Image (cartoon, helix red, strand yellow):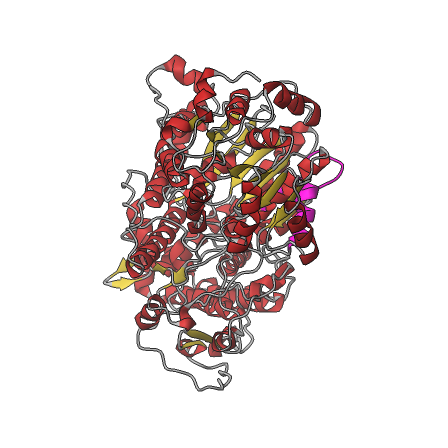
């Protein structure tokens, strides 16, 4: 085999090496034969051939290429081509491994994996194979934790000495770098590999790495600059249409409807179902949205780590067969646990139901669409309420990492997580620069946005900014003003270092002593381990506080505009604090679990997960120091004060029996709108709150609305437009009660939390009977509308906004 001069220096002795790297046992012709005959490809994509040549030389290789460019082939072909020996592949997710292994076995390639799910019998077979002079398996997939274990190192040492350890491959290599968007502490240990096996070539691959991350990857893995071949593909995906859809608040049912309408419309236009992925930040949202879409006739399934692995494997397989109109799953509602390494070319749309935590994450997830080079759409739902919520999550995660660094005398963590999220916010709020250009600039490409022809080469009207610039600017005006949104989200605090699928869970600020006990390592403050999360990062993001997003001159949508706005103040009831839709609350048995030795919980499936061990204690703020309950908590009667409904004992939540009825509501009412009729609740299929409890809460809210407005024409005229028809007024109040109940339901995961929030919503309605509250009509929008004469009426303002909107809709 002729070795190119460009690769000749690879054959030299490595510094500190005890032996000389032998000549490669294959050449470019062998690689081409495997590429065409084993995998069935006819032409190379991107720089694949150059990467094969670099691998043949025995050099270290760093590949940065967009999702869908065939990165896995870059190490699989050389591994299969070599006459003997084995290639070790380090991968971060079990789903990614399973997908690649299944595809390789389909091509009759000997491949296996060694993970926490590997049975003892299979593990013994793998060890036996590695002990032979010529291992049968050509690739072995494993996790960074397994690779760095002493047991695994003992298996690799004989292979290395016999010259059978061909290559070490690090997939999703951005996890190595603390500057990357998905930093994983265990990945940093991979730097030991070069010291342990100096003659074994390395290959690192990622779809999203800025120049700074690329340098960090090479440095940590010990890739010497003069022996490193770097291949950076262009980051632009010209066949993807990027669109940002702006909202003035997080409104669950309206957003679900919008997603449904988009997917149904796409199916109608194409004449058959299309394959898509909807990304959500937490599991509960995945479940609710999936159930909603399935209830409307779409073939949709949830995918997250709270579901049993066997069900996830089935969903992945059926989704792979979906999109053809005959069988399989067409849509998955997934967390970030889904997608890495998935090889499905006909994904026609990616929807981000809420805001990701990093720009790289957004880019990588959208890159799973349109791998067949056909047009595909990427929709990002954006509201400033959601933006501030995610910003708070990142800030608290960074603070935890700073505390851990100080405790362990480690170097201070970087600010990369905050910078990446800031860029994503600027990307979403930007309506002047092409979205394709913004993406390429972030990853280091120099693009002159003033050069019309150059911009057209990146984006031929394939983003909302370029296709409909004026309409996009107009839509952005529906965003809530920054100064009006930030105070609502400011109450949020994170008291648990782990959330759902690598994302922390937003929690209300706990008693300060409890938070301090967690930081000092108190056992009761530590989170429970999660099942089926291999591997998971202990430290989510880099440290630091995210800079505030600059205030813009946008204004709230006028009352007359038909939106489903329900302000954040109402959803953040005074006793329960702000909570994201579908986010978990403490299970009933959490107080007992904290007093017992920790054990690994099994992953629940179905709606049982809403009360499973994955849930994190929901901290309740009190104006005074909480009163500890006795060791055996007694039931709280129906007439108890709200402050007694939920208590904290050593940081543990105690739940009292649920009572949705106030004392003054216990008697029947003769009001017109309380006539007995069938109640049809929004998202009635959801089982996280019993249906009877929801109906009772709906009746209570509706009763309160009728009591305030039904027979008081003067009060009605002060808050709503004139309407003398009592039946119309009844319809308005019933619809408003239904939407208020759904808002409460969306923000609750436990019955106790639901009870407290629904009672707070009814109380907010009753306070509208006060003259000061009615004076909010003249207060304008956010910022001045929530206070009159020094009194705060945030929840009441939201109720009035909702009533006005419903009234206009009904009268139309």
Which contiguous range is marked in magenta? 309-333
Residue 687 visible to the viewer: no
Q: Quadrant of residue 768?
A: bottom left
Task: Name the residue at 51% across, 55% down.
Answer: 150
* Residue furthest left as drawn: 790
Q: Name the foreground residue: 77 vs 684.
A: 77
**Image coords of residue 379 (percent x, y):** 50, 36
In the shown orientation, is residue 121 left or right of residue 67? right
In the depicted view, which residue is nearer to us: 799 or 754? 754
Q: Is residue 597 above or below residue 504?
A: below
Figure check: 359 above or below 186: above
Residue extending farthest to the right is 326
Residue 413: in magenta span: no
On the image, the x and y values in percent for residue 137 come to 66, 40
Percent of width and height locating residue 668:
56, 75
Q: Would you say residue 490 is visible in this rendering?
A: yes
The residue that appears at 45% across and 51% down in the rendered structure is: 186
Residue shown at 59% from the left, 21% from the top = 27
Whether residue 310 appears in magenta in the rendering, the answer is yes
Residue 191: horizontal and vertical position, in percent?
42, 44
């Amino acid at each position: 085999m002729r070795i190119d001069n460009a690769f000749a220096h690879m054959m030299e002795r490595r510094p500190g090496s005890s032996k000389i790297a032998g000549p490669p046992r294959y050449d470019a012709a062998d690689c081409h034969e495997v590429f065409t005959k084993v995998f069935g490809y006819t032409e190379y994509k991107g720089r694949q051939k150059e990467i094969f040549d670099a691998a043949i030389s025995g050099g270290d290789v760093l590949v940065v290429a967009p999702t869908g460019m065939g990165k896995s082939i870059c190490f699989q072909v050389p591994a299969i081509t070599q006459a003997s020996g084995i290639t070790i592949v380090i991968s971060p997710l079990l789903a990614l491994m399973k997908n690649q292994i299944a595809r390789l076995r389909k091509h009759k390639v000997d491949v296996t994996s060694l993970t926490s799910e590997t049975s003892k019998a299979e593990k013994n077979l793998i060890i036996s194979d590695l002990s032979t002079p010529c291992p049968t398996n050509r690739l072995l997939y494993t996790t960074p934790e397994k690779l760095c274990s002493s047991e695994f190192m003992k298996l690799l040492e004989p292979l290395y000495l016999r010259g059978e350890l061909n290559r070490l491959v690090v997939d999703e290599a951005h996890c190595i770098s603390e500057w990357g968007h998905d930093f994983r502490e265990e990945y940093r240990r991979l730097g030991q590999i070069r010291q342990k096996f100096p003659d074994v070539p390395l290959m690192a691959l990622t779809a999203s790495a800025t120049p700074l991350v690329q340098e960090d990857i090479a440095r940590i893995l010990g890739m010497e600059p003069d022996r490193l071949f770097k291949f950076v593909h262009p980051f632009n995906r010209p066949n993807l249409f990027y669109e940002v859809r702006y909202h003035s608040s997080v409104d669950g049912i309206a957003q679900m409807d919008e997603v449904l309408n988009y997917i149904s419309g796409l199916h109608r236009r194409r004449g058959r179902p299309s394959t898509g992925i909807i990304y959500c930040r937490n599991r509960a949202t995945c479940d609710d949205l999936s159930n909603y879409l399935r209830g409307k006739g779409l073939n949709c399934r949830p995918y997250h780590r709270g579901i049993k692995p066997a069900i996830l494997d089935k969903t992945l397989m059926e989704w792979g067969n979906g999109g053809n109109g005959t069988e399989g799953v067409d849509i998955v509602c997934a967390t970030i646990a889904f997608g890495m390494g998935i090889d499905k070319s006909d994904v026609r749309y990616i929807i981000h139901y809420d805001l990701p935590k990093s720009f790289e994450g957004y880019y990588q997830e959208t890159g799973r669409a349109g791998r067949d080079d056909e047009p595909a759409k990427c929709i990002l739902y954006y509201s400033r309420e959601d933006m501030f919520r995610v910003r708070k999550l990142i800030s608290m995660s960074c603070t935890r990492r700073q505390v851990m660094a100080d405790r362990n005398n480690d170097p201070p963590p970087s600010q990369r997580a905050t910078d990446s999220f800031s860029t994503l916010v600027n990307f979403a709020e930007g309506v002047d620069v092409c979205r394709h250009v913004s993406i390429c600039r972030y990853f280091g490409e120099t693009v002159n946005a003033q050069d019309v022809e150059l911009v057209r080469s990146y984006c031929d009207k394939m983003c909302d900014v370029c296709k409909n610039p004026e309409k996009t600017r107009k839509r952005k005006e529906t965003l809530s003003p920054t100064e009006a949104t930030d105070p609502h989200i400011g109450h949020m605090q994170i008291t648990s270092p782990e959330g759902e699928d690598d994302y922390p869970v937003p929690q209300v600020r706990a008693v300060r002593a409890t938070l301090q006990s967690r930081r000092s390592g108190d056992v009761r403050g530590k989170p429970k381990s999660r099942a089926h999360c291999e591997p998971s990062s202990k430290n989510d993001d880099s440290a630091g506080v995210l800079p505030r997003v600059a205030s813009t001159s946008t204004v709230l949508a006028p009352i007359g505009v038909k939106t489903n706005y329900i302000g954040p103040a109402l959803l953040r009831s005074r006793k329960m604090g702000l909570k994201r839709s579908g986010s978990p609350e403490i299970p009933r048995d959490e107080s007992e679990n904290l007093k017992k030795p920790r054990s690994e919980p099994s992953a629940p499936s179905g709606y049982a997960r809403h009360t499973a061990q994955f849930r994190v204690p929901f901290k309740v703020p009190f104006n005074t120091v909480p009163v500890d309950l006795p060791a055996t908590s007694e039931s709280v009667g129906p007439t108890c004060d709200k402050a007694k409904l939920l208590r904290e004992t050593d940081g543990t939540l105690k739940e009292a029996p649920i009572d949705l009825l106030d004392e003054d509501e216990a008697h029947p009412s003769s009001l017109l709108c309380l006539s007995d009729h069938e109640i049809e609740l929004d998202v009635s299929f959801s089982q996280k709150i019993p249906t009877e409890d929801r109906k009772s809460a709906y009746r209570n809210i509706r009763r309160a609305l009728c009591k305030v407005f039904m027979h008081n024409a003067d009060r009605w005229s002060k808050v709503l437009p004139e309407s003398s028809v009592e039946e119309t007024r009844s319809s308005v109040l019933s619809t408003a009660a239904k939407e208020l109940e759904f808002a409460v339901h969306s923000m609750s995961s436990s019955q106790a939390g639901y009870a407290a929030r629904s009672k707070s919503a009814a109380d907010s309605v009753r306070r509208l009977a006060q003259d000061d509250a009615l004076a909010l009509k003249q207060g304008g929008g956010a910022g001045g509308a929530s206070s009159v004469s020094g009194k705060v009426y945030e929840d009441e303002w939201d109720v009035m906004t909702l009533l006005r909107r419903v009234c206009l809709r009904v009268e139309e």
